[in-house]
Image (tube, rainbow, N blue to C red):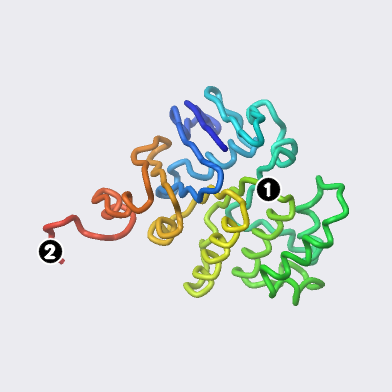
Amino acid sequence: MLTLDGLDVWRGPSQVLHNLDLEVKAGEIVALLGANGAGKTSTLLTISGLLRPRGGRAVLSMDGREHDLLRLAPDRIVAAGVAHCPEGRQVFAGLSVAENLRMGAFLRRDGEVASDLAEMGDLFPILRERAGGLAGQLSGGEQMMLAIARALMSRPRLLLLDEPSLGLAPQMVDRIFDVIETIRGRGTTVLLVEQNAGMALEIADRAYVLENGRITLSGLAAELAEDARLQEAYLGLAPAGEGA
């Protein structure tokens, strides 16, 4: 579904992605792991058209058609089937919950937006209860649900999720990860950026590890979870043979 090939991306004077190769297949959850500053968010911003690389390719393949994402404006990328749920939620605090959800459907002209609003209420019952309230009055976890639901209102085929567990209580993190699996089960492919490597690897099919803008590890999530380098760096486990 998505192929990134040799991406070189700069932010100001600094190169943040170096010859990045990454692939996401239809129906997968793919985790992109790494420390702060590794280039994870820059990768998603590039896919969304909010950063423009100096070199490489980004191709979205759907229904026998290929879309060159580097030639499309961000709104056209959304129309092609990609939605981005950004780091920090970025809900519209002064708008109601329902208005935030409708903003996610701003490119759609069909008559099914109302039914999709009802569907988001089924997926996130708290959003139905708070539909008329201001988004800025929601808790952090509720705002995360709203940000995901807003992204889903565009009916994406590929959902980019940036740090959905950031700053949330453990119980809410469990709920958010359950929702991610539900989203995949309903037919939406997910590229998940997440610092909680353990939970990300539990639900992902495959994973990549970014360090300083370069992919250093990749493979099946279950296999990477057993990799000593990843365990030491991201799961807080000591290498085999070391004492406590």
Work out which residue is located at the far front of the displayed protein and give it: 64
Q: State the image coordinates of residue 77 (x, y, percent, origin top left).
A: 69, 37
Give the amino acid at mark 2. Answer: Gly
Work out which residue is located at the far bottom of the displayed protein and give it: 129
Crowding at dot 2, Cα within 10 Å, few <14 / some 14-19 / many 20+, comes out as few
Above or below, comparing residue 238 to residue 156 in the picture: below
Q: Toward the viewer: 69 or 142?
A: 69
> Where, quadrant-wise, is the N terminus in this rendering?
top right
Q: Toward the viewer: 19 or 14?
A: 19
* Mark 1 vs mark 2: in front: 1
Q: State the image coordinates of residue 2 (x, y, percent, origin top left).
A: 56, 36
Q: Which residue is drawn at 57% across and 64% down?
A: 179
- In the rendered structure, which disc, 1 or 2, sits on the residue that comes first in sequence? 1
Give the amino acid at mark 1. Answer: Pro
Above or below, comparing residue 35 to residue 186 in the picture: above
Q: Which residue is drawn at 55% across and 59% down?
A: 164
Displayed quadrant of residue 79:
top right
Above or below, comparing residue 15 to residue 131 in the picture: above
Crowding at dot 1, Cα within 10 Å, few <14 / some 14-19 / many 20+, comes out as many
Q: Are marks 1 and 2 in contact (CB under 8 Å)?
A: no
Residue located beneath label 1 in the image: 156
Q: Residue at x 62, y 63 (%)?
A: 144
> Where, quadrant-wise, is the C terminus in this rendering?
bottom left
Q: State the image coordinates of residue 11 (x, y, percent, origin top left).
A: 54, 33
* Element on which disc 1 rests: loop
Q: State the image coordinates of residue 48 (x, y, percent, origin top left).
A: 63, 39
* Element on which disc 2 rests: loop
Residue located beneath label 2 in the image: 243
Which circle marks residue 140 in the picture? none
Mark 1 and mark 2: span between their CA atoms? 47 Å
Above or below, comparing residue 177 to residue 171 in the picture: above
Is 228 on the left-hand or right-hand side of 101?
A: left
